[in-house]
């Protein structure tokens, strides 16, 4: 049997960089020093007005092909995780297949998940490879949340950044992904929400659970999301450990979705993990939604902190509400 193996990752970020000094000058009433301490974010990349998630995803995939000498004709399936598609239809992954020049026998689909999306994508790729439907899967995560955020929205503009990652998932002879666990609670859909632009009439649209402070199309109830995360993630971690017959001490790194520094610190305290085992990589990116995990893996590999044989737990959580995790053993080297 073939098993999914996480191969090389390339990332692409918009050219425009928005740092905290710029926000401080634009909004003198914003306490950027306090915001910086809470979020841990110093700057974020912002897509141009005519730049979409597909543009970012195509650029990331082209980098992947060029940087790692990957023959695009070897791709059997394209998975795109995005919540900012180019159009309601057709599927953005189909447009990307054409732009990337992938063979027409390539499968392609979008899946609309946010912060848990990378782990879901790994699970989908693992199923395709184990089931014989593909040998090489291109997993792209791409998001332009900035298009949902008004310039005067202090709570969201200081957190979210745009970006994309392209990950090659290929068949291997040894299992490197295990213990997949998922969770969904749609009763919390109103915690992180864009309630316009779809087919639901506005009179029937789901409403934010509390009165928004700003008028951005995107609404986020930060405190409620923190509570959800602290309630769900420790149990998810225990379930994955149980499924893989591992003890917490046997996990080298816990790689968690990079929401904010404050939330990661609260999780680390709850889980009794120090920063060496639970890295933070968001200062120069912000919260890039589904791309935080592959960006972190990319950076930790480059820094020599992830090497073949190292065992990590991958955890995503957020909008949906949705959460997912798995164990991953590194098997790729440059």
Image: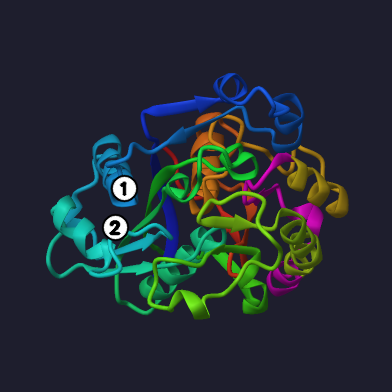
Residue 75 at what x, y percent from top left? 24, 59
Image quadrant in which you'd find residue 304: top right
Label 1, on which residue? 52
Locate the N terminus and report the quarter of the image it occupies.
bottom left
Residue 67 visible in image: yes
Tally of numbered discs: 2
The answer to which quarter of the image holds residue 201 is bottom left
Q: Earlier in the sequence, mark 1 or mark 2?
A: 1
Do the residues under discs 1 and 2 have CB atoms within 8 angstroms? yes
Q: Is residue 183 magenta?
A: no
Q: Alpha-carbon distance for marks 1 and 2?
A: 6 Å
For the record, the magenta segment spans 239-261
Q: Is 321 left or right of 60, judged from the image as shown?
A: right
Assess disc 2: are there few (<14), some (14-19) or many (≥20) residues with their C-alpha within 10 Å of its C-alpha: some
Q: Secondary structure at mark 2?
A: loop
Residue 86: which disc?
2
Along the line of sight, the residue nearer the viewer: 297 or 264: 264
Residue at image position (16%, 57%) is 102
Camera-side residue of 308 and 19? 19
């Amino acid at each position: 049997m073939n098993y999914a193996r996480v191969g090389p990752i390339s990332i692409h970020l918009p050219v425009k960089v928005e740092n905290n000094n710029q926000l401080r000058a634009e909004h003198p009433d914003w306490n950027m020093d306090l915001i910086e301490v809470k979020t841990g974010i110093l700057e974020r990349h912002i897509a141009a007005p005519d730049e979409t998630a597909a543009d970012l995803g195509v650029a990331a995939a082209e980098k992947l092909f060029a940087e790692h000498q990957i023959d695009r004709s070897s791709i059997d399936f394209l998975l795109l995780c995005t919540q900012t598609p180019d159009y309601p239809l057709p599927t953005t992954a189909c447009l990307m297949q054409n732009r990337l020049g992938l063979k027409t026998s390539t499968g392609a689909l979008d899946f609309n998940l946010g912060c848990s999306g990378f782990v879901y994508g790994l699970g989908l790729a693992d199923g395709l490879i184990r089931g014989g439907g593909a040998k090489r899967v291109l997993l792209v995560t791409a998001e332009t949340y900035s298009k949902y955020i008004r310039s005067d929205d202090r709570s969201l503009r200081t957190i979210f950044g745009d970006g994309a990652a392209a990950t090659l998932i290929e068949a291997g002879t040894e299992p490197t992904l295990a213990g997949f666990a998922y969770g969904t609670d749609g009763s919390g859909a109103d915690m992180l929400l864009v309630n316009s632009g779809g087919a639901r009439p506005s009179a029937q649209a789901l409403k934010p659970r509390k009165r928004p402070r700003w008028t951005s199309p995107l609404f986020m109830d930060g405190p409620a999301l923190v509570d959800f995360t602290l309630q769900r993630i420790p149990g998810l971690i225990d379930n994955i450990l149980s499924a893989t017959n591992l003890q917490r001490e046997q996990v080298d790194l816990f790689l968690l979705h990079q929401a904010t520094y404050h939330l990661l610190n609260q999780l680390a305290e709850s889980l009794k993990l120090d920063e060496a085992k639970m890295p933070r990589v968001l200062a120069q990116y912000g919260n890039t939604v589904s791309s935080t995990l592959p960006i972190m893996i990319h950076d930790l590999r480059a820094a020599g902190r992830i090497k073949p044989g190292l065992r990590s737990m991958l955890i995503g959580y957020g909008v949906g509400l949705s959460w997912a995790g798995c164990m991953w053993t590194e098997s790729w080297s440059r």
